[in-house]
């Protein structure tokens, strides 16, 4: 997987085990990045700007890292001690996914669960948006979300979904036990089968003319409400 940009490169080069090679634009002169590169034995390839432009699908700032693909966890890797997971119901925007990963890591969420199909996976944009937090976050990939939710419930988790209809104020729910928090798709929200597996449906009240929030913003509000109630 190719990732690019100076900030994400600085994060990854702090622990360069997953880096296979480095591609630099000729004349690259960021001393802080070069200093990190000097401490590795990695293969460095220099290319002209137009060559790097063809490789990067975005702003690369003169540096591309070729890193190993993210290795997902299995649901069986969730230990009995882990009690707060976030479940993403077929998110499509890699920027939302990356921002949610960063929020989850900051809040101490134990794991993120995603489906294999019709869900954005860990890619260069997700890695860049999450700004180096992927290595600290357990991301579990499952074949079927409703089945995964059923297994979580067997392990003592209460499943809290998010929707505007047939829901209660998110501040009225007791989050003291094991919690699985579901964040729905950006456009269509939670799928029917996922919603049917929820124990509670929470809503974030809207006081202005806007009737919905960005998925990463809504998840941030919900995640920290869970954390606040567990302190």
Image: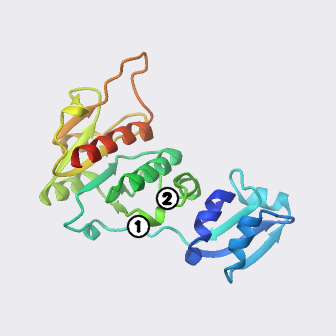
Residue 14 vertical position relative to residue 52 in the rendered view, above or below: below
Q: Residue furthest top?
A: 209
The residue drawn where x is 37% and y is 64% is 138
**Left or right: residue 134 compared with residue 146:** right
The residue drawn where x is 64% and y is 63% is 9
Q: Which residue is at the front of the view, 29 or 72?
A: 29
**Which class describes the residues within 10 Å of circle 1: few (<14), some (14-19), or many (20+)?**
some
The residue drawn where x is 56% and y is 75% is 18
Residue 72 — which label?
1
Quadrant assignment, res 27: bottom right
Quadrant assignment, res 81: bottom left
**Residue 199 locus on image (x, y percent):** 15, 42
Residue 69 vertical position relative to residue 114 in the rendered view, above or below: below
Q: Which residue is at the front of the view, 107 or 197?
A: 107
Are the residues flagged by discs 1 and 2 in contact, CB closer than 8 Å?
yes
The residue drawn where x is 71% and y is 66% is 33
Residue 13 vertical position relative to residue 214 in the rendered view, above or below: below
**Residue 200 locus on image (x, y percent):** 18, 38
**Which class describes the residues within 10 Å of circle 2: few (<14), some (14-19), or many (20+)?**
some
- The quadrant in which the N terminus is found is bottom right
């Amino acid at each position: 997987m190719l990732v690019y940009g100076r900030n994400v490169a600085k994060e990854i080069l702090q622990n360069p085990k997953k880096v296979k090679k480095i591609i630099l634009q000729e004349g690259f002169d960021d001393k802080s990045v070069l200093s990190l590169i000097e401490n590795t034995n990695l293969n460095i390839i220099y290319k002209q700007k137009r060559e790097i432009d063809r490789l990067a699908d975005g702003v690369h700032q003169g540096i591309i890292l070729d890193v190993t693909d993210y290795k997902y966890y299995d649901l069986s890797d969730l230990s009995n001690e882990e009690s707060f997971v976030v479940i993403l119901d077929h998110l499509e925007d890699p920027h939302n996914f990356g921002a949610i990963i960063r929020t989850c890591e900051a809040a101490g969420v134990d794991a993120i669960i995603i489906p294999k199909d019709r869900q954005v996976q860990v890619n260069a944009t997700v890695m860049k948006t999450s700004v180096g937090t992927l290595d600290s976050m357990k991301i579990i990939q499952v074949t079927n979300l409703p089945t995964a939710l059923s297994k979580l419930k067997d392990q003592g988790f209460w499943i809290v979904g998010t929707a505007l209809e047939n829901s209660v104020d998110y501040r009225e729910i007791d989050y003291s036990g094991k919690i699985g928090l579901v964040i729905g798709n950006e456009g269509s929200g939670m799928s029917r089968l996922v919603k049917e597996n929820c124990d509670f449906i929470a809503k974030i009240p809207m006081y202005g003319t806007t009737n919905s929030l960005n998925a990463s913003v809504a998840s941030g509000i919900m995640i920290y409400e869970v954390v606040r109630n567990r302190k």
